[in-house]
Structures are given as C-alpha cells and as structure tokens.
Image (cartoon, helix red, strand yellow):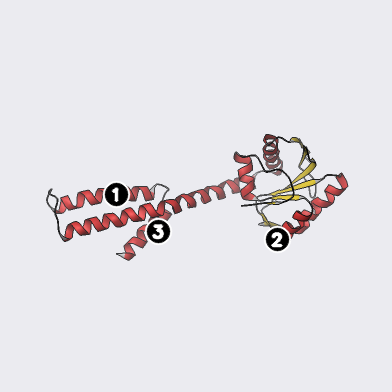
Amino acid sequence: MRRLYRALHRLALRGPLWTPLAMAAAAFLVGITLPLLWGGGVAVDGPWRSVALGLAAGMFAVGVSAWPARVRLHREEQRQRDLEELRRMPREQLAGLVAGAYRRAGYRVVETGRGVGAGIDVELFGRRGTSLVQCRHHRQATVDIGSVRELHMTMRSAGASRGVVVTTGGYTELAGSFARIHDITLVDGRTLLRMVRVAPPAPVHGRLESS
C-alpha cells in the first residue's frame, strides 16, 4: 500500500496542474461507490468497506498534500518558460522592457541604443541623480565581476552616480561584492521577470536585486 501511495504522489506531481484535485475528487467518489458496488447496491460494513474507505482516504490525502507542491512546480516551470522568452529577445527589445519598467516606477528614462560591449542601454534620471543601465543579454549563466567593473568605469567617465546591470541569469559572488561597494544594483533573471510583468523595480541604490 505504501508503494501505491508513493506512485500516486509521483503521478500528482508530474501530471497536469489539476491532477491532485482530480485525485481528491476521485477519492470521494471511490469512498461512496465502492461499498455500494460490493454490496450489490446496498452499503456494506466489514472489511470491504474498510478497504474502500482506506483507499479513498489515501487517494484524498495524496491529492491534498501534493497540491501545494504541484502549484509551486507549475509556477517554476512557467517562470523558466518566461525567462527563455526573454533570452530569445533581441537586446534592444529587452532594453525597451527594462526602460518601461523604470518609467512606470517614476523615473525619467532615455533609451540610448548604445548597448554594445560596455555601452549603456538606458539612462535614468531621478531625485538622486543619474543612473546608467546596462543589459547583459546573453545565455551565460552568471555575470562576472569583469562586466560589473566595466560598467563602473563607464559610470565614472560619464559622471553618473549609480548604475544597474540587468541579466536574464545571475551573478558571481565577486560581482555582488563589487556592486555593493560602488553603488551598482544587480538585477537577476527572476527579479527581471517581476519588473517587466507587473511590479515597478526597486529604487536604484546599489544592492543585489535577486530572489
């Protein structure tokens, strides 16, 4: 019986999102109909009823317990699909999404179109001065300290007080440490998704934006 429960739990996690709920509903029907079927249309007591109710209770428990995990798995799968779409976008289109997110947050935004190498994709103008935004748009899993250092050099030459690096991936620990020292905000893939979907980005103040 324990093997059966484990198999049902795996099915609930790997099937469509509605699988756990369907299992719980099926368990309810099993608990009602099996005793009637075995009793020839009349509810029966004894071992058969205990077996039917035990099977129904097990299926119901599996369905209910698997539902939160299945929802989390579904959200993670959707997040990965959305990230893959961002990675396939041309850099200019991604920069436009980022610019729109900061515009909704209340910044005055200028899209520079100079996002090549250590170039700048977006300039932000707010109460705390000018910030330069660079989109590191490639399939590399992590952005290293060299890329963040390049932005810092560009900030110094342009007289900008702050900087933002945006990527669809993540950052190395050294990149994060360097960014915190030099007022550079790092936006990783998951934070980027939240920015371009609904919520405005956090104020630019030199920290690692990740989840």
Residue beneath label 2, please? 173
Q: CA distance from mark 2 to mark 3?
A: 36 Å
Left or right position of 46 against 96: left
Residue beneath label 3, please? 10
Left or right position of 89 against 47: right
Identify which amino acid the numbered label 1 is placed on.
Answer: Ala
Instruction: State the SS at label 3.
Output: helix
Q: Nearer the viewer, residue 96 or 39?
A: 39
* Residue at 49% over, 51% down: 72
Instruction: State the SS at label 2.
Output: helix
Residue beneath label 1, please? 26
Q: CA distance from mark 1 to mark 2?
A: 49 Å
Mark 2 or mark 3: name the one nearer the start of the chain: 3
* Residue at 35% over, 56% down: 62
Mark 1 or mark 2: name the one nearer the start of the chain: 1
Give the answer, above or below, for where 46 lies relative to 190: below
